[in-house]
Structures are given as C-alpha cells and as structure tokens.
Amino acid sequence: MQCNDDSIAFLDDDEDVQAAGSTLGVWRLLIVDDDEDVHQATEFALRDVEILGRRLEFLHARSSNEAISVLRQTERVAVVLLDVVMESEDAGLKAIGRIRNELGLLNLRIILRTGQPGYAPELEAISSYDINDYKTKSELTRNKLFTAVTAAVRSYDQIERLDASRRGLELIIDGANRFIAEQGLQAFAAGVITQIAALLGVPPEGVMCVCAAPGADSQTPIGQKCTVLAAAGRYQEYINQHVAALENHELCDILDTCLSEQCHHATERGLALYFPGRQGRNFAAYVESGQSIHEPDRHLLEVFCANIAICGDNVDLVERLRQTAYVDGLTSLPNRAAQIEALDAGGLQGAVLALIDIDQFSETIDAFGYRFGDLQLQAIGRRLRAAMPPDVYLARVGGDVFSLCGGQDVVNPPLLREILADTFDSELGPQSISFSLGFVHVADAGVSGADLLRNAAIALKRAKVDGPGNEAYYTAEVAIQTRERVRLLQNLRQAFDSRRLFVVYQPQLGLPEGKIIGVEALLRWRNDEGQFVPPDQFIPVAEHSGLIIGVGAWVLRTALQAQQKFLAQGFRLRMAVNVSAIQFRHPGFLGMLEEAIAESGIEPSALELEITESVAMYGWGQVQERLQAIKDMGVSVAIDDFGTGFSSLSYLDRLPADCLKIDRSFISSLDASESGARIAEMVIQLGKRLGMRVLAEGVEQVEQLNTLIDLGCDEAQGWYYAKGMPEDELLDWLSQQSR
C-alpha cells in the first residue's frame, strides 16, 4: 500500500499509545514560606488535585536561599508559590531575580503570596520578573488557590511545548544548513542519523541509514538491494555492506515495510523514516529510540522529513556545484582551485610544482578553431596522466596551462621534455607542440598554494622571455626581475596614457650617391627622471603584455601625420614603420592599417612596413596571406633584422616583400672580420637575386659605408649620416641638406 509521506504510521494500537501517554509524570510545585502552617495548608488544599492528567508533587523551602538550592537540584519544577516577606522584607523579590537571571529558569511559573499587604511588590517588579499572579494569603481560599495553580500549570505546559517545538525546529534548521555543507551522500546520511537522534532526545546509538540500490528488481530481497550508508553505535561496522549482513531479521522487516510502502513507521523500540530520492534511490533511516514517539516529537519528525527530502535533492546539487568548482570540464582534471587546495593541504616537502604552457596556443586556435584546440588539450592531459605516477598531482590551471606537483625525480625539465617530445595525433596528422616550463620548489617557498602557483607563473614568464620552448626555476633573482618588468610595464602604461612617449625619425639614404629617400619612425621614451629608457628594454615588455597593439597603432598614425608635414614642406619621403609580430597577427591589424592610411591622405606607396622574421613562428601560410593583403593596399614591405630570426631561405622567395634590411650586428663586424663582410655580401646578393632592395642599418663609420657600396648595397641608415630626430629637428636637417 501507499501512504502519505508527511505522516508517521504507528504500528502499535492506538489504545496502547494512549496508555503510554497517561503515565507522563507529575507537576512539581515548590512552596516557599517561612510559616510551617502555610506549607501544611497548601498541601492539604491541593493534595488530590489533578491537572492535565497529572497529579501534583510538593517540594518545600523555608527561605529564599533554600528555595534556590532546591531549584538547583530539581529539574522541571512547574510552579513556585513564593512568600514575599521572609528573612527580609524583599526576600521573595530577590529570589525571583536569582531564579530568572542566575538559574535561567524562564519557563517556571511564579505565584507571589504575602501575609502583609503593605509589602506588596511594585507593578514594575511584577512585569520585569514575569510573575504570573500576586495574592494575599487571606484571600487564597481553596478554590482560588486551585484556580491560580491550574492557570500557572497550564501556562507552564504551553510554554514548555512551545520551547520544545522551538528547539526541535532549530535542530531541523541547523541540520538543513549542515546538510547543504556536507560533501557527498555518505556524509549526508550520517547527518540524518545525528539529527533524528537529537530530535528524539536519544544518543545516536543503534542508528543506521540505507539506500535502495539502483537497478535491483522488485524480487530482490531487501537485504540485497539496500546498502548501509552510515551507522552509529553497534551498527558502525556494517557501513557500505548490504543490510542482510546485519543478521537482524526484525530490523530488515521494518526497513522493507518502510521502503516498499514508502511510508514512515514507528514501533515501541524505534522509528523508521522514509525519504524519497531521485532516480529510484530511496532512503530509509532507523533509530532505536527505546520509547514511544509522543505527539510533539511526531510533528517535529514530520517537519524534519519534509525538510530532509528537499535537502537530499540539494546534496546532489551541491555535489554537482563542487564538481564544477573543482574539476575542469574539458579534461576532467582538477582545476586551479583544486590545485591550490591540494597545495594548501601541505605534506609536500621536497616536491616541485611545474607549470606547462603550450606555446602559441592562441595562434593554433585562430588557425584551426576551438575544437582543434580542445582536442589538443585533452590529448596533452591524457599523456601527462598516463606518464606520471598516481601520487603526482596533475591539474589544468589555465586555458593552455597544466600544473604538476610531485617529487623532483619525476617533475623536472628533462623528463617532461621527453614525455612531451613525441608528436600528438590530430585530424591534420601528427602535430609537434612546443612547451614553456616554469618550476618552483615547494619546500623553498614556504607560502600558500596561491602564492606557489604565482611563483611558478613568474618562473614561466621568465622562461618565455627567452622565447618559446624554454624553462626557468623560480628564484629570488627571477622574482626581482619579474617585479622590475612589472614596474616597467606600469610606468610604460602611464607614459603612454599621459602621452610621454614620442617618435623620432632617422634618415635613410640611397647608395652610392647618398640621396635622402626616406625615414624610419622610431619609438622613444624619456622617464620622469628625464632619462631615456632603451627600446630593447621596454619594447619586449610592451609586446609580452599586448600593450604594443595600442602603442604600435599610435606610432603608425603619428608617423603618417608627420609625413603629411614633410610633404607640405616639399619633402617626398618614404615612411618606414616597424610592426611587431604581436601587432602583425592581431585580427584588427589590417583594418587599423587601412583606416590610418585613409585618415592621413598619404599615398599607400609612400609607406613601408618593417616586419621582423619572428612572424614566421605563426606559420608561413598565414604570414604570406597577410603580407599579400598589405601589398594589395599598395604598401611596401621590408624584412627587418634579416639573418637574426627564424626565417627559412626556402620560403623567402615566396614572401611578397620589397626590401631586406641587414641587421646592425653584421654591419658592426664589417671592419672586424672577414666573416662579417661575407654575411653582408651574401644577404646583398640574395636580395638582388630575389628582386628586393637591400638596406643596411647601423652604419656608423666611413669604412663600413665604403664596404657596403663596394658590395652593391642599395640603401643605408645610421649615425654616420644622422641620428633619430624629432619632427621639427628633422625638418631643419632636411632643409640644410637640400641647400
């Protein structure tokens, strides 16, 4: 049969329950008076009285101090008949203050009596001390005494019931809050046991909780399809076993009835409660109470069961939320929060924390899409998990960053390089992936998990400064360098925002006649102290942070505006502007370039963009496509610092470039060794065979210039001719040169 989940069905007969309820005890009445006749008269008047089915039990005290002593030693005193005047005129009132404040007996009812009407208490005292009644002894006839005591007992009974309900509801609310915080079903079941025992006022002994196993058919015995989730007392050893292991047939029958009828049941020995669950996983809890369940407890248990049914659903929700909070959804590995908690848990002395960063991962996403990137991340996670011992903690702590924490024998650069060296299978065929690594010794750091991750990230950033595929360990020196770079970046941002960066222009001349044919725009920064910050210090910081995208766009627009002024003064010059690899691959670069040219009104052919060889790391196909788009606008392209980057001669003839720039490092060695001259000669000849102009930068001596002319170099720039000059200074220099 089915029954209402919100009602508790008693297996005992109703008459038996009533019989049990008729022996609930007595009402304790304390008579406090220094007159022995009053004690005898009061007890005589009330000796046969029965109130709410209970008789009166009389307690006696002859002074206020003796009354306090009796109340300390006796529980559940319902009413006190208290004389006002005893050892002192206000002894009764003082006793009331101690009863309420010192003993904390707030539910006890007090009837004041006095044989001296002149010593009546003030109304304020009666209100403040919660006094039920005040009578003179002369007016307390038997009927009036019975009426006053009956009213006081009823009041005490109602207050006690309300207080018991309040305490029970507090337990339920507290239990609900605790259940929300529990982690997992077993902890939830253990909490249910504790709360039921608390509501019944019994110790959590002989308590168990079971769950109907999913997939078990109706013919399967209850003992085989139910599992003990949590237990207390003598049942603890049966946790995670089938109910059949209990060898208690009576208990199994009660649980079978509770689960099959989906109904609560109470017996003289205990109580079985039913809790519906999701996906057929229903629960039952059994408590050996050793007593019958009274009506107030029954109502509280009904409220508790309704509340727990909701809490059970919430446990599943909390578990899913915890999964979301601590597990990476893509790789099913622990995430950053989980890694921090694992580090904070301690016990990792001598361990090493490593961060593994996939180089150029965002470029991979741009080229092949997010799905390809997701598959790559999953493959890397699987390989690391398969290669590492179980005690090595593996997590995904960032978009393209994994962490490993374990012993130095397994978490070290050579072993990780070996593990990650093999190609990864993909839809596009085998893929080689480059990784940058950052390491920190856990014992050396002595800091929190979040700080350890930050220190490992500092080491990783230091590794990436040297280019892709490098590694670095966190040290105090690395931390100082990182802080200096951060400080430099902050100052650079402020300088850019406050327009304290400026552009200078270095002339470029045609060879051999030395005619001025163009200028190169060069970014400069003078700090607050008036000192120049070298470009090779702040440009890499701007590139690494992405600030170069905004700064580069500003340099381009500033250079084109200057070119307008040069043209207005009669100087038709080619404007060369450097483009960072970070700028070059930015999705909005081509649009920005086209917009800047249109705003300036300059002919696109008067602009030349200098691209470094490092753009090759983003894939020659994409580079070729973007360079062609630039050429289609009418802008010329120069390959800057040729011979120092990652270029391949097999691809050079396919690039739509107009000029090769010989790096200054080769020019400076022209007069120092024959090898320098040979490299310069090779680049010049290569450029001519590919139909490109060749420009030598960093020319500082006449001997270098003469050698370049002899080798057939087309153009040159450097301090031998002129340094980089601000716009107005360059105009003056141009005017002087034209005379």
Image (cartoon, rainbow, N blue to C red):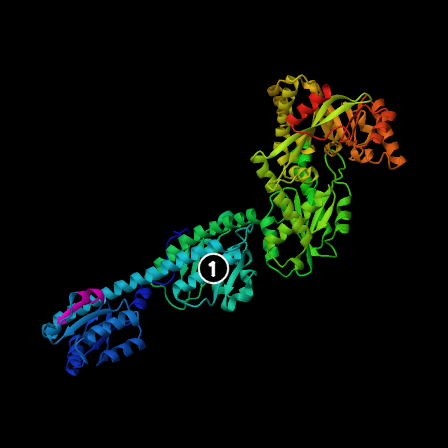
Give the camera-side residue of 719 and 33. 719
Residue 9: give x, y in percent of width and height. Answer: 38, 57
* 72 shown above or below 500: below
**Amino acid type of the residue that numbered disc 1 sits on in the rendered structure:** Gly
* 322 shown above or below 567: below
Residue 189: give x, y in percent of width and height. Answer: 49, 58
Which span of residues is magenta-colored? 124-135
Residue 34: give x, y in percent of width and height. Answer: 18, 81
Quadrant of residue 549 within the rendered picture: top right
Give the camera-side residue of 271 and 125. 125
Quadrant of residue 392 within the rendered picture: bottom right
Tell me the SS state at disc 1: helix
**126 drawn magenta:** yes
Residue 113: give x, y in percent of width and height. Answer: 15, 73
The residue that label 1 is drawn on is: 191
Q: Is residue 299 visible?
A: yes
| Residue located at (23% from left, 80% from top) | 61
* 213 shown above or below 703: below
Quarter of the image with the C terminus is: top right
| Residue located at (30% from left, 65% from top) | 18
Residue 669 in the figure: left or right of residue 425: right
Residue 643 in the figure: left or right of residue 726: right
**496 drawn magenta:** no
